[in-house]
Amino acid sequence: MAISSDLGGLRRTHYSSDLSEGMDGQDVTVMGWLLTVRGHGGITFATICDRDGEVPIVAKKGGECPDEVREALSSLKAHSSVAVRGTLRASPRAPRGFEVVPAELRIFSSVQKIPPFEPVAKTVKNIDTRLEARPIDLRRSVLQHTFKMRSRILRAVRDYFEREGFIEINTPKIISSATEGGAALFSIFYYDKPAFLAQSPQLYKEQLTMSFEKVFEIAPIFRAEASRTPRHLSEAISIDLEEAFVDYNDVMDRIASLVRESADAARSYLEGAKRIADGDVSITVPEIPDSIPRHTYSSLVDRLQDAGAKTQWGDDLYPSDLKRLGLDGFYFIVDWPLGPKPFYVKESEGEAGGAGDKQQQQQQQRISESFDLMYGELEISSGSTRIGRREDLESRMRAKGMNVDSFGYHLGAFDYGVPPHAGCGIGLERLLMALTGTANIRDATFYPRDVDRLVP
Ligand code: AMO
């Protein structure tokens, strides 16, 4: 039978990326979704998209392919899920030098509804319209490349950790107390007790350095972010690392390697994709310098004030202010004021800052062994050396007005000898934004969660 709707025993023989004009005359079975269908008199042109790219189908009247196949193909709407078994024919007119002449068509699922936009449309609908039809949206080539790069980046990150002797951990996401300050917590009920969704694996990853020394986790973090910005999600994926017997300088070196290897993985994906798509890929991965510059917080405050900003020592550095300094690419901001940092961040000892740190020196301000990794004005990661002694942790908690008793389970670990340790959290979506040039974080995650969105 030339037309059917069952997969049955039929299996794909080739992905689009496996096909070439050199296979002239070969039988092939391709499967995917219909990108386009156009009928011209006795000839129907269709394009099937699969995981890797496009396969042109040409069904001509006059014995070359069964009439019923041609007619059924020309009646289908874009996005239908189909298989075509047929013969590959070299064709100098076709973009990739070949087309497939169908002998058999399977229509697994024909389209019932016209989507609100086409995957190849030049003008792209706003993100809310696109999210309402996210599975179709994710068929668009730019998102295909973005998420395939995401997958390669994650593989490169895991390879790095494996090679460097880290073990992958998973820590509880239902927790009893905040780690990153109370404001951004989601409350839930855990049976009859109040509980929260974890903002970070912070305390667990620190504890696990006692037994495993070098750990990493790639998992969701939950932040009740009231801000509607292109860089905040309520549920994000964090690449967390924590390591014993090192400080924040060693962690920055690790981040530099991770970013470089992630960029290499993204670039190698793109090179392959460009070969298949004949160069039709609009993403460019930024070059990562051999050494990522480090600026002290205090030196940037000085520069901001010289540039006319109202920023005072101790203030956060806002993207709108940082823009004035024209810092681009990746760079670290190091040695942040201790005050606003979470309770587990270690205070710097000895002389802090460089020649430009006049305010910090004048005001005898306390600074911390901490850093943020930035890409332009986007914060990609933050990390620090951690406090290693229970009494120091408790006094920081008290200074911040925290309830020390509710952290008993964590503080107790420090009675048994915790190694000096340091670590960081890297926002995966933000890293992907930097490496792919994605402007809105919602397009760097499959199904974004934000203050207005709980579906799809
Ligand atoms: P911090 O709170 O800075 O540090 O978070 C670390 C990184 O996670 C990402 N991130 C987010 N991404 C998207 N939407 C959000 N709402 C969001 N919040 C955070 C950012 C950020 O740099 N425990 C520390 C890390 C550590 O010291 O190990 C922490 O959570 O890229």
Image (tube, rainbow, N blue to C red):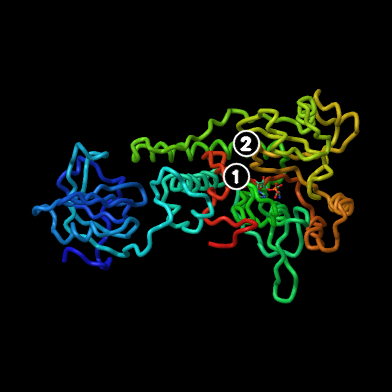
- Residue 103: x percent and y percent? 16, 57
- Residue 95: x percent and y percent? 26, 39
- Residue 228: x percent and y percent? 66, 50
Q: Is residue 251 left or right of residue 98?
A: right
Q: Given contact means CB atoms under 8 Å apart, are the residues at marks 1 and 2 in contact? A: yes
Q: Is residue 51 left or right of residue 428?
A: left
Query: Is label 1 within 8 A of ligand 1 (CB to nearest ligand atom)?
Result: yes
Q: The N terminus appears in which quarter of the rendering?
A: bottom left
Q: Residue furthest right?
A: 363
Q: Residue furthest bottom?
A: 192
Q: Residue furthest front?
A: 41
Q: Which residue is mark 1?
A: 430
Q: Is residue 106 above or below residue 372?
A: below
Q: Residue furthest left?
A: 63
Judging depth in this view, the residue of 315 and 418 nearest the camera is: 315
Q: Is residue 187 above or below residue 44?
A: below
Judging depth in this view, the residue of 61 and 449 nearest the camera is: 61
Three-letter residue code for mark 1: Arg
Q: Is residue 58 left or right of residue 356?
A: left
> Hey, which quadrant is residue 219 in on the image?
bottom right
Which label sits on residue 82? Answer: none
Figure label count: 2
Q: CA distance from mark 1 to mark 2?
A: 9 Å
Q: Is residue 235 above or below residue 441?
A: below
Which label sits on residue 375? Answer: 2
- Residue 53: x percent and y percent? 34, 47
Three-letter residue code for mark 2: Tyr
| Badge 1 element | helix
Which mark sits nearer the N-terminus, 1 or 2? 2
